[in-house]
Amino acid sequence: MNPWIAIGALALVGLLIPLGMMAVSTLLRPTVPEKGKTTTYESGEVPTGSTRIRFNIQYYMVALLFVVFDIETVLIFPWTVIYRRAVSMEGVGLTGALLPMLIFIGVLVVGLGWAWRNGAVRWIRHPDRSQRSVEQ
Amino acid sequence: MFVPLQGQAEPLLPETIGKWLFGSNMAIWQEAIAAFIAAFIVGNIMLAMTGIAGPWAKRKITAAFTDRIAVNRVGPAGLLIIVADAVRLLSKELIVPEEADRPAFDIAPIVVASSALLGFAVIPMGHIFGINLQLADPETGMAYVFAVASIATLGIAMAGYASSNKYSLMGGLRAIAQNIAYEIPLIITAASVVLFTDTLQMSQIVAAQQEPLFTVAGITIPSWFAFVNPFAFILFMVANLAEVGRNPFDIPEAPTEIVAGYQTEYSSVYFVLFYLGEFLHIFLGGAIVATLFLGGPTGPFLPESLNFVWFVIKIWAVFLFTQWARSAVPRVRIDQLIEIGWKGMLVLSFANLVLTAVIVGVML
């Protein structure tokens, strides 16, 4: 049997269970609409401003770094699968199987070192907060 | 010497059910019906486990750690609180903020709940009375399970952004930053396991751990990868804790900082779905840990036809570990989290991969 039929079936079940719960809840729950309830929660205060705010650039930096490393994990997986086969194969051997990957990972580590030095993975705090920092 | 593993063609759950219903020659629609029934059984097993864990076991465990009693009024040992809580939560009024982005706000909880369930399709859950409970066993099993497990982050990001709430936005962003920082150590550490197994197929990964490792005082230790490579096991457990968002890495919710993070605006059944998705995710993490490092559903004392019990014990052990961490370890800050992830875990996981590759290569 094709395994993806069963996986597709579980996807269907995984969709039907939440939808079923939603349907049951619709039958059970009361609906008492009221203006105060539907305002955005902001610790009980009247909400100020929009939520479409500017947020910390750091989130973008780590996301960018992630893309690089994620693609690289995709390349590492096939290598790990064939690694032992390649080592015991004639004409490939340990150096032939290991060295290219070491160089590949080495290049990436250099890249990580560069990002590290440039502060891409250092969370810069707001200048105001440094004065009342609890550290030191 | 390199010896490829012998694949044993054990019938999976859909095939067993299909055989009972339609005989051995099935049309494609009969296969689909058998697969659906099998998927329904597996889905409900996990749902039942989540039902016990969420409203009852979590409270009891936390209470035991903090020297309290917790639920004990409804039913024996408070067990009927599960029913009471289910009714209570489902019958709450659903409040949707007017600012919310409607389709995304409604889809997000479904994405979180169903993506966590989807991972269980390839997990070898062992046998009940000789029936193999594994749903599917594709060759790309491990890549699949990590792929679907990380879809939950998308649901969390949707929830955070669609709620139009500043706390939710912060929670959603934090969840993404955390998941992408710990995803790579998690997968790289898992890749170091594949170096021993030569395959991504889950049943073969379990089969590779059955050889005896060594014998101490008459007790044979199996070559579970937690024993073969304990360093990878520890790394994986820590990265897994971050993936499921439990202390010390629970900053996407961080109740004392950002109310409830991405869940702030969710109520009623939507909240239940998030809660369900989170617990399913913890159990999925436990199932991955059990399959990759703890020998899957195998274990001593029980016959192989009943080893589903061992699977349950192992995933509950991982669940207990997350609850222990939740009670005992303080939360890290976002800057510490990013530094631990990118400067600590990532470097250590690469060191682990390279060292494992060198050792496996030299010993072969």
Image: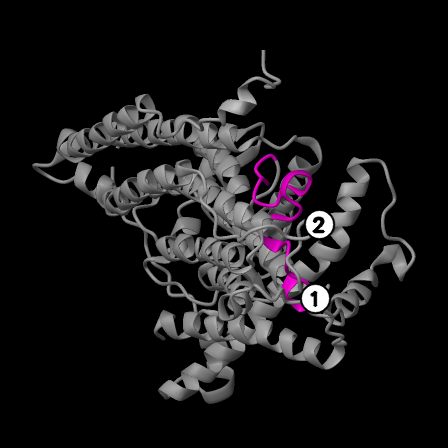
Q: Is residue A83 above or below residue B278?
A: above
B291 vs A105: above or below: below
Q: Residue at x 89, y 59 (%)?
A: B76
Quarter that holds the C terminus of chain A:
top right
- Magenta stretch encompasses residue B264: yes
Along the line of sight, the residue nearer the viewer: A74 or A131: A131
- The answer to whether residue B26 is visible is no
Q: Which residue is mark 1?
A: B268
Q: Are marks 1 and 2 on the same chain?
A: no
Q: Residue B219, percent across and down?
A: 57, 34
Name which residue type carries label 1.
Ser
The residue under the point 35% across, 53% down is B143
Q: Position of residue B164 (x, y in %)?
A: 55, 57
Read off the magenta span: B248-271
- Tell me where residue A92 sits by quadrant: top left
Question: x, y (%) of residue B245?
Answer: 56, 44
Kindly identify which chain the residue marked by label 2 belongs to. Answer: A
**The residue under label 2 is which amino acid type?**
Glu
Look at the numbered disc 2 and give the secondary structure of its residue: loop
Which residue is found at the position 72% from the left and 64% from the top? A37
Instruction: State yes or no: residue B347 in magenta.
Output: no
Q: Is residue B86 left or right of residue A120?
A: right
Left or right of B93 on screen, residue B216: left
Q: What residue sits right under mark 2 in the picture?
A: A45
Q: Residue reaching furthest left?
A: A91
Q: In the depicted view, which residue is nearer to us: A113 or A102?
A: A113
